[in-house]
Image (cartoon, grey):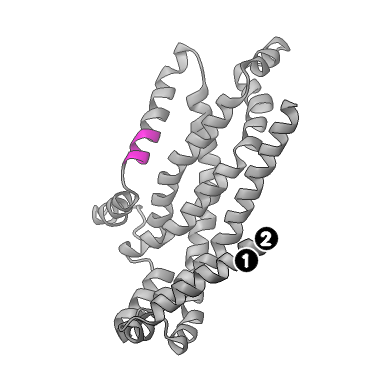
């Protein structure tokens, strides 16, 4: 531990000296690391970040349910369920294959431009829809991996007790699968939280849009640093929680293998 601490201090000291000794450092410090500008705009950007949190929470709740539904539909066996499986596969492949920003643009600008009666034109609504469609596709694959990791004997035992295929999935397979996929689900939700900034391109005034407005108004990039700090405060604890859960599952697996 002592060697690690000393080597870290030496490394970061060398990096700091290399940066600050550059002839252009005063310019970089003024435009990116201006302290008064940082503290002046941090509360403003933090206030706008509430919109990002709202987007994230609404989309996350929808994604958790819809992703599981798509995964279960794709896991149904038998020729009678082939059309349903085909639709679930097509949905996951299409929305994982298209760039998120493209889906946000098409839905955020294209659908309201049609002027269809009863169709909302609120950018926030289409931001939630876009993020939900994209991340449902990713999360459904995480759920499917968890379902397929359950040994077939579990479903067979449930069927032998008189449960139908759907009941076996609901009461035996899916509960075990969900417990196994919590760490990768958290990784997807970290990505969802970060991707909420993409909806700024369709007019949603959230944290990134606010930082961009302040940067263009004052020709200083420090507001982006304030936004970065907010995101790190939110995502780093979740990242550490994910790593802890992965390590705990690995320890349990190794203990069971013995």
Q: Are marks 1 and 2 in contact (CB under 8 Å)?
A: yes
251 up-or-down from 232: above or below: above
Query: Where are the magenta residues, as a range?
Result: 92-97
User: Where does label 1 land, which residue?
Assistant: 5
Callout 1 secondary element: helix
**Residue at (45% x, 72% y) in the render:** 15
Asked if 101 appears above or below 73 in the picture, the reply is below
Q: Dot 1 surroundings within 10 Å: few (below 14), some, or many (20 or more)?
A: few
Vertical placement of 118 versus 41: above or below?
Answer: above
Instruction: Say which quarter of the image contains residue 122.
Output: bottom left
State which quarter of the image contains the C terminus.
Answer: top right
Residue 144 image point, x, y percent: 52, 30
- Return the mark for residue 1: 2
* Residue 14 colored in magenta in the image: no
Give 110 or 254, whichever is nearer the viewer. Answer: 254
Left or right, 110 with respect to 214, comes to left
- Which of the two residues, 104 or 187, is positioned nearer the viewer here? 187
Query: Which residue is drawn at the image coordinates 38% and 66% (left, top)?
Result: 204
Task: Characterize the local packing of mark 2: few (<14), some (14-19) or many (20 or more) Cα atoms within 10 angstroms.
Answer: few
Q: Secondary structure at mark 2?
A: loop
Give the percent coordinates (x, y) of residue 85: 43, 23
Q: Main secondary structure of the magenta part?
A: helix
Disc 1 and disc 2: Cα gap in Å?
Answer: 6 Å
């Amino acid at each position: 531990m002592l060697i690690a601490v000393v080597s870290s201090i030496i490394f970061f000291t060398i990096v700091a000296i290399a940066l600050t000794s550059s002839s252009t450092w005063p310019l970089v410090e003024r435009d990116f690391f201006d302290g008064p500008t940082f503290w002046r705009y941090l509360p403003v950007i933090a206030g706008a970040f509430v919109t990002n949190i709202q987007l994230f929470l609404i989309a996350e709740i929808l994604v958790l349910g819809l992703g599981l539904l798509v995964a279960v539909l794709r896991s149904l066996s038998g020729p009678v369920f082939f059309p349903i499986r085909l639709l679930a596969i097509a949905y996951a492949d299409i929305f994982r294959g298209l760039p998120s920003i493209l889906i946000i643009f098409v839905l955020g600008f294209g659908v309201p431009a049609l002027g269809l009666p009863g169709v909302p034109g609120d950018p926030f609504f289409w931001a939630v829809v876009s993020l939900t469609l994209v991340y449902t596709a990713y999360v459904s694959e995480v759920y499917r991996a968890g379902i397929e990791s359950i040994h077939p004997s579990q479903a067979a035992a449930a069927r032998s007790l008189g449960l139908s295929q759907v009941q076996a999935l609901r009461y035996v397979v899916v509960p075990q699968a969900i417990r196994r996929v919590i760490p990768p689900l958290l990784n997807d939700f970290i990505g969802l939280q970060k991707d909420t900034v993409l909806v700024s391109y369709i007019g949603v005034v959230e944290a990134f849009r606010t930082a961009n407005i302040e940067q263009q108004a004052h020709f200083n990039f420090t507001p982006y640093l304030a936004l970065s700090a907010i995101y790190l405060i939110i995502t780093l604890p979740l990242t550490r929680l994910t790593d802890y859960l992965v390590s705990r599952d690995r320890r349990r697996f190794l203990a069971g293998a013995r």
